[in-house]
Amino acid sequence: MGKEGLLVLLNVNNINVFYGQVHALWDVSIQVHAGEIVTLIGSNGAGKSTLLKTIAGILPPKSGEILYDGDEVTHLRANKMVAKGVVLCPEGRSIFPKMTVGENLRVGAYTREKGEIEASYERVYDLFPILKDRRNQMGATLSGGEQQMLAIGRSLMSAPRLLMLDEPSLGLSPLLTEKIFELILQIRSQGVTVLIVEQNAVMGLSTADRGYVLEVGHIRYEGSSTELLHKQEVLETYLGG
Ligand SMILES: Nc1ncnc2c1ncn2[C@@H]1O[C@H](COP(=O)(O)OP(=O)(O)OP(=O)(O)O)[C@@H](O)[C@H]1O
Ligand SMILES: [Mg+2]
């Protein structure tokens, strides 16, 4: 998809983020256009999750600004960001093991009007029929792949416009990983813009329109997925030669 003429939905401008004395993100800038899938790759500890959490309003940047849909949202808290449609599906899924599938999904709808919730369940169950079959089962009894679907489904219950997925393929088999990425394409086709953090750089970039490479807190490369997938330095470091 060409980005010309597309609305810039998310504009992260030179943000610096600290954990106490630890400077985790250095002048990081990224843009996401409406309708795009953008993938962020980088080694362990590069700052990928930190960037998503900062956009989600979970961590405050020390400097720089974040614009979403033209509004300055740099210091908005997470609940306000969710209400605006910016939703993070966190690393490690964090589903509630002692709640049923249906109850887990309901948690994702905390910002929604009562009347909208039924339709959201239908949308999630259409996308993930297995969750409908399992709706009265405890979260803990789901397989790893089903738990990932539940985590994504719970995010969809918040009606995201920008869905951020932190390592959706972590711990999944190649087949299930492929399935998850097919579903991500399907979610995008429903009008959701997607920002993904992915360890599996080939899968992550092949599914995306554009990508960014984060190295110890700095954006090192950016470009179309095709450019990044053919870039020698990226190939050597992240794509296994
Ligand atoms: N709560 C925290 N307190 C202090 N330092 C932290 C905290 N969380 C992360 N860091 C540090 O910030 C840096 C970036 O961490 P982050 O979790 O964003 O990396 P990541 O790219 O998501 O890595 P991974 O691929 O392992 O998930 C790391 O050096 C990490 O040790
Ligand atoms: Mg991480």
Image (cartoon, rainbow, N blue to C red):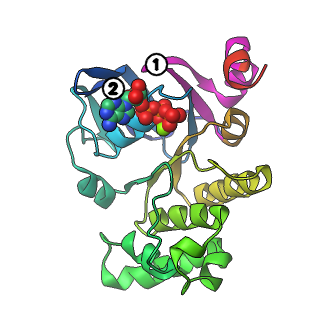
Residue at 60% across / 32% down in the picture? 210
Q: Which circle marks residue 13 in the picture?
A: 2
* Residue 220 or residue 148, whichever sits in front: 148
Tell me where the magenta segment starts and ends, as one range: 208-234
Residue at 41% across / 40% down in the picture? 52
| Residue 124 horizontal side relative to residue 55, left or right | right
Q: Residues within 10 Å of mark 1 (few under 14, many from 20)?
A: some
Say whether marks 1 and 2 touch (CB < 8 Å).
no
Which quarter of the rendered picture does the N terminus lie within? Answer: top right
Q: Quadrant of residue 50?
A: top left
Q: Residues within 10 Å of mark 2 (few under 14, many from 20)?
A: some
- Some atom of ligand 1 lies within 8 Å of the CB belonging to the residue at label 2: no
Q: Secondary structure at mark 1?
A: loop
Quadrant location of ligand 1? Answer: top left
Q: Secondary structure at mark 2?
A: strand
Mark 1 sits on what residue?
216
Looking at the picture, how far across and down is residue 155, in whole percent? 46, 62
Looking at the picture, how far across and down is residue 29, in whole percent? 40, 24
Residue type beneath disc 2: Asn
Q: Quadrant of residue 87?
A: bottom left
Q: CA distance from mark 1 to mark 2?
A: 18 Å
Residue type beneath disc 1: Val
User: Looking at the image, is 57 positioned above or below residue 62?
Assistant: below
Looking at the picture, how far across and down is residue 19, in whole percent? 27, 29
Residue at 65% across / 84% down in the picture? 133
| Residue 194 horizontal side relative to residue 182, left or right | left
| Residue 152 horizontal side relative to residue 144, left or right | left
Residue 135 seen in render: yes
- Some atom of ligand 1 lies within 8 Å of the CB belonging to the residue at label 1: yes
First in residue order: circle 1 vs circle 2: 2
